[in-house]
Image: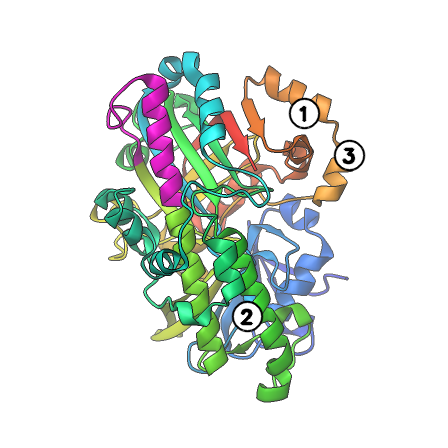
């Protein structure tokens, strides 16, 4: 597809006008450097312009610097819809609902941890199930799982798997209140109830990282977030609602495909954007089911954090509180949220879809824990297992993107292509040379997740900063990794 009409607005901000494609209701803004924009395949432009054609979309559609082809929306797609007249689309949320990131800091330095790294990674790998179809330590009854889906991380707090600070430093305090299990199929419930406390497969991981002094961009903000020692150890993990969220998305995509045009007269450019009016019974049912999956994902990450604390304590031979594994923040991707944003100077209630994008609240936001209201929200951008990740902070300029930011480095090639192109022996040799110790449920996953299969994480962060989406705080370098 030609990119006719694409114009550069700022150093890292581009626009597709409504004339780009017939039926577009709003323009598209794409954040990215020239290098990133040039590397995006045409499917990204096709998909985000289709999003800009959906009923009830407001202001403009956005694509983040890590944007790449997805299902319906591109990964990195953001759009706000009128809460009364707009739609909700599973393709704008994703199959892994609330696939999110959690970052935990410790009181340990790399020098202190290094002698125990391999034992620690091995024990974490044995304790936290990873891979396709893995089952967790909690085999819950349907009644227990129902409670968990309504309560999210609050369920973990009641059961002794969380502390109050964990919830305070989790988006939505770990619970989306509109969850309603009656909107969820029995098949989804059966898939989800055995998977709490599991990483999953693909790009899901748990990684031990080092905050090297030379990689700290903002020392004051890093200290507020809890990173204040040279070569401090942190742990990052990435997972979501597993088969539970996937089944919910599948169920409602089938329903919306049948009723979207037949019942509501909605025409879309791409069947993957099947949708329903948000205010309609079917739209509300999907939203309530989505909240259930989001809450399961919050609880999933909280159980993993509990296991993490246990393993650190066992390996280091210390009381569980001694390594001081304190949560920095837990952020969601792949959700739709009812929020209030300024539209033409007037506050408006909107439904914001973020597909492979994270919320990035600015300094002063009352939705942040008090300790972060001066700095802005911690924003986590995960990189590949070879390149490192970044911690950033929300900024006031982010209002124009509905306070949304990039969420990762973004793929530049598909998994099949990566498996064909990259040698497992070379990848393992590279990891060994870089002193990154890794355990994986499948050697094939290493090829799929090779560093060159992803965009340059530093370039994505430069674009994120230049576009005013969030501000870099510290780069985090991997030393140990568990891959699904």
- Image position of 372 with respect to 61: above or below: above
**Region of the chain picked out in magenta, as a range:** 301-326
Is the residue 389 above or below the residue 76 in the image?
Answer: above
| Percent of width and height locating residue 128 | 46, 35
> Image point 37% across, 46% down: which residue?
330
What's the CA distance linking mark 2 and mark 3? 35 Å
Q: Which residue is drawn at 67% across and 30% down?
A: 443
Q: Does the magenta stretch include residue 257?
A: no
Name above or below for residue 190 compared with residue 473.
below
Residue 476 placement, left or right of 95: left
Of callouts 2 and 3, the N-terminal one: 2
Q: Mark 1 points at which residue?
A: 427
User: Which sits earlier in the primary sequence, circle 3 or circle 1?
Assistant: 3
- Kindly state the secondary structure of the residue where label 1 is placed: helix
Residue receiving disc 3: 421
**Quadrant location of the C terminus?**
top right
Q: Where is residue 428 in the image (x, y as percent from the top left)?
A: 65, 22
Quarter where residue 24 is shown: bottom right
> Which of the numbered marks, if any, corresponds to residue 89?
2
SS at mark 3? helix
**Image quadrant in which the N terminus is located:** bottom right
Q: Kindly report the distance in space between the C-alpha atoms of the residues bearing marks 2 and 1.
A: 38 Å
């Amino acid at each position: 597809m030609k990119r006719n009409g694409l114009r550069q607005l700022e150093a890292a901000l581009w626009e597709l006008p409504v004339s780009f494609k017939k039926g577009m209701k709003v323009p598209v803004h794409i954040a990215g450097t020239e290098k990133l924009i040039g590397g995006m395949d045409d499917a990204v432009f096709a998909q985000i312009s289709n999003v800009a054609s959906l009923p009830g979309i407001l202001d403009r559609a956005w694509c983040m610097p890590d944007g790449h082809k997805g299902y319906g929306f591109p990964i990195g797609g953001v759009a706000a819809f009128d809460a009364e007249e707009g739609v909700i689309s599973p393709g704008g949320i994703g199959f892994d609902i609330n696939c999110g990131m959690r970052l935990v800091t410790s009181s340990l330095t790399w020098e202190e941890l290094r002698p125990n790294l391999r034992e620690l990674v091995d024990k974490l790998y044995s304790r936290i199930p990873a891979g396709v179809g893995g089952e967790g330590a909690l085999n819950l009854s349907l009644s227990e799982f129902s409670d968990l889906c309504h309560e999210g991380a609050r369920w973990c707090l009641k059961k002794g798997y969380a502390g109050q600070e964990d919830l305070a430093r989790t988006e939505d305090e770990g619970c989306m209140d509109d969850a309603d299990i009656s909107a969820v199929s029995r098949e989804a419930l059966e898939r989800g109830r055995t998977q709490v406390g599991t990483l999953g497969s693909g790009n899901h991981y748990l990684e031990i990282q080092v905050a090297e002094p030379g990689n700290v961009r903002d020392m004051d903000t890093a200290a507020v977030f809890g990173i204040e020692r040279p070569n401090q150890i942190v742990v990052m993990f990435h997972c979501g609602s597993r088969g539970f969220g996937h089944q919910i998305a599948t169920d409602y995509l089938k329903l919306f495909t049948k009723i979207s045009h037949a019942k509501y007269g909605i025409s879309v450019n791409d069947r993957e954007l099947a949708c329903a009016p948000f205010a309609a019974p079917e739209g509300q049912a999907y939203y309530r089911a989505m909240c259930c999956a989001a809450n399961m994902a919050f609880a999933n990450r909280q159980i993993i954090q509990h296991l993490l604390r246990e393993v650190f304590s066992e390996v280091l031979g210390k009381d569980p509180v001694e390594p001081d594994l304190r949560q920095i923040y837990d952020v969601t991707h792949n959700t739709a949220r009812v929020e209030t944003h300024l539209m033409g100077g007037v506050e408006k209630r909107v439904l914001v879809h973020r597909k492979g994008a994270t919320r990035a609240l600015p300094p002063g936001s009352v939705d942040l824990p008090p300790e972060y209201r001066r700095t802005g929200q911690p924003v986590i951008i995960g990189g590949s297992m070879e390149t490192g990740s970044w911690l950033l902070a929300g900024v006031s300029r982010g209002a124009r993107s509905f306070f949304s930011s990039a969420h990762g480095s973004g793929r530049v090639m598909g998994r099949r292509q990566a498996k064909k192109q990259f040698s497992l022996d070379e990848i393992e040799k590279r990891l060994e040379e870089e002193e990154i110790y890794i355990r994986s449920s499948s050697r094939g996953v290493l090829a799929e997740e090779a560093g060159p299969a992803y965009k340059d994480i530093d370039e994505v962060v430069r674009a994120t900063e230049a576009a005013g989406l969030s501000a870099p705080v510290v780069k985090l370098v991997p030393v140990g990794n568990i891959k699904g």
